[in-house]
Image: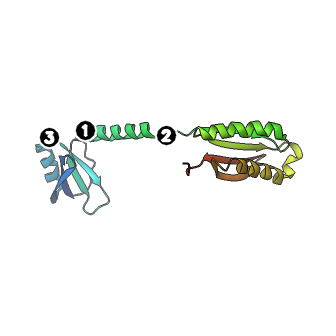
Amino acid sequence: MNRQIRAREVRVVVDEGGGKNTNHGVMTLDDAIEMAEEMNLDLVEVAPEARPPVCKIMDFGKFQYERQRKERRARKQQKNVEVKEIQLGPKTDEHHLGFKIRDARKWIEQGMKVKVRMKFRGREITHPEIGRERLDNIAAQLQDIATVEQRPSLEGRAMLMVLAPSTDKK
């Protein structure tokens, strides 16, 4: 038998199933273990920081199984948001920029986030305001379907901005 509960006295709660619990009050640890063994269940410490600690008499294997099922269900319902990225430079011409914005619009309409990376090469880094203007211009062109999740920020030789689909859609 592996004893992990260290308190001398514990407050005992019995799991009746169906979300119902009955409080059996404060008793010694030995009495609580004996009570759990009589019921062929496990004594599990659920609130160790309480004074006295709260222990629950329950089927621990069933409890773990139910918890894993809940976690799996939560993972299935979780929506994975894909992040697409477009890269451009401060000298990218308007025609090419139009393609990039069109792609970003398509991805945002599909529910994806778009990371816009402005790469500075050589001495271009001395004029980050050009890149910031470009990124602000892109955000303005996509403001009808996207919101700026991360404002343009300089990270090394690249300026990044993240656009996310607007939540205030029809």
Q: Is residue 121 visible?
A: yes
Q: Residue at x 75, y 52 (%)?
A: 136
Judged left or right of residue 166, residue 24 is left
* Viewer-nearest residue: 29 or 15: 15
Picture coordinates of residue 167, whole percent (x, y): 55, 50
Q: Residue at x 69, y 48 (%)?
A: 161
- The residue carrying mark 3 is 40
* Viewer-nearest residue: 65 or 128: 128
Give, as a three-letter code, the residue at label 2. Answer: Lys
C-alpha separation, residue under disc 3 versus residue under disc 2 = 41 Å
Give, as a three-letter code, the residue at label 3. Answer: Asn
Q: Is residue 155 visible?
A: no
Which numbered mark, 3 or 1, is in the foreground of this view? 1
C-alpha separation, residue under disc 1 versus residue under disc 2 = 28 Å
C-alpha separation, residue under disc 3 versus residue under disc 1 = 13 Å
Dot placed on the residue nearer the N-terminal end, 1 or 2? 1
* Viewer-nearest residue: 10 or 65: 65
Compared to residue 93, the image places residue 128 above or below, namely below
- Circle 3: is it few (<14), some (14-19), or many (20+) Cα within 10 Å? few
Say how many tags the image has.
3
Which quarter of the figure has residue 37?
top left
Residue 79 bears which disc, if any?
A: 2
Toward the front, the furthest residue is: 170
Circle 2 SS class: loop
Dot placed on the residue nearer the N-terminal end, 3 or 1? 3
Residue 62 bears which disc, if any?
A: 1
